[in-house]
Amino acid sequence: MKTYVITGSIGHISKPVVEALVKAGNKVRVVTSNHDRVKDIESLGASAVVGSVFDAAFVSTAFKGADVIYTMIPPIWQTTNWRASQNEVAKNYADAIRENKIAYVVNLSSVGAHAGNGVGPVDGLYDFEQLLNKISGLNVKHLRPSYFYYNLLNQIGLVKQAGILGGNFGDGEKVFLVHTRDIAAAALEELTTLKFSGASVRYIFGDERSGKEIASVLGKAIGREVNWVVFSDEEQKQGLLQAGVPEIHAQAYTEMGKAIRDGLMQGDARKHKPTLSPTKLEDFATEFAQAYAG
């Protein structure tokens, strides 16, 4: 039995990880900022530790006694400098890992975290990777998943209204795609086998498609013609702003789309392609159709 600490509460990736770790007889603590999630966490057989990851003392206490930590920097919406806020959380994590002499960390990063600049919100994940890599004696596996299939669910309204999907990418550079359950499976494998030493990277994606192919497959699943529209960067940003996304985040997401289009974001992953994970676009299309009909 090992003691695991899982940051990021229980979302699409961490919930199945927690369930599997508990089922295997491990002690699992889940870090959450939301008191309302405590019952849900405890129902999985884990214990909840409630507090802010911006509180260094809280993070250090939460990590105390752990054999393995799963780290993720949560979405940060209230900020005037997204990267600086990410770095604040990253420093708290790194300091707590060092103070508690943690031996193993599995870190949820992203495709594009090799670049350092020009990849929007992923730039902060580069910083965190570098911070972890500098901790003496730490064994860390950075998971770098690609574009999530479920991000496409956010465009269902656009499909219903105009029969289109789109982004400021998708016409040249094909997009690596991944399902969150495949990320969870990879995370669980790394967390339980601990067959890594030093600092290493694992890319995770299950398919590679153009925008046109994405629209065609999802359109077929819902029984209507759907086209992929490539927006200009300004159109992309304005669309996000109109959807209520804050200015600083809209700019960052637009930059990330440009990085996909230009090949920067996926460049290192393209050089180090992994064995593809199981879930393909056609598999996700069933989920898309169910959400579309709902």
Image: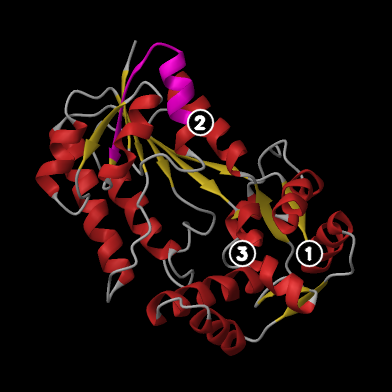
**What is the span of residues highlighted in magenta in the rendered image?**
16-31
The residue to which callout 3 is attached is 154
- Against 139, residue 114 (above or below) is below
Quarter of the view holding residue 270? bottom right
Q: In this view, does 155 lie to the left or right of 18?
A: right
Chain-order first, disc 2 or disc 1: 2
Between 290 and 150, the one nearer to me in the picture = 290
How many marks the image carries: the answer is 3
Residue 175 appears in the figure:
yes
Circle 2 residues within 10 Å: few <14, some 14–19, many ≥20 = some
The residue to which callout 1 is attached is 210
Mark 1: amino acid: Ser
In magenta segment, residue 23: yes
Q: Element at badge 3?
A: helix
Residue positioned 73% across, 68% down in the render: 173
Q: Element at badge 1?
A: loop
Point out which mark residue 16 bears. 2
Marks 2/1: CA distance?
Answer: 30 Å
Residue positioned 29% across, 69% down in the render: 78
Between 150 and 94, the one nearer to me in the picture = 150
Residue 165 appears in the figure:
no
Marks 3/1: CA distance?
Answer: 18 Å
Residue positioned 66% across, 61% down in the render: 152
Chain-order first, disc 2 or disc 3: 2
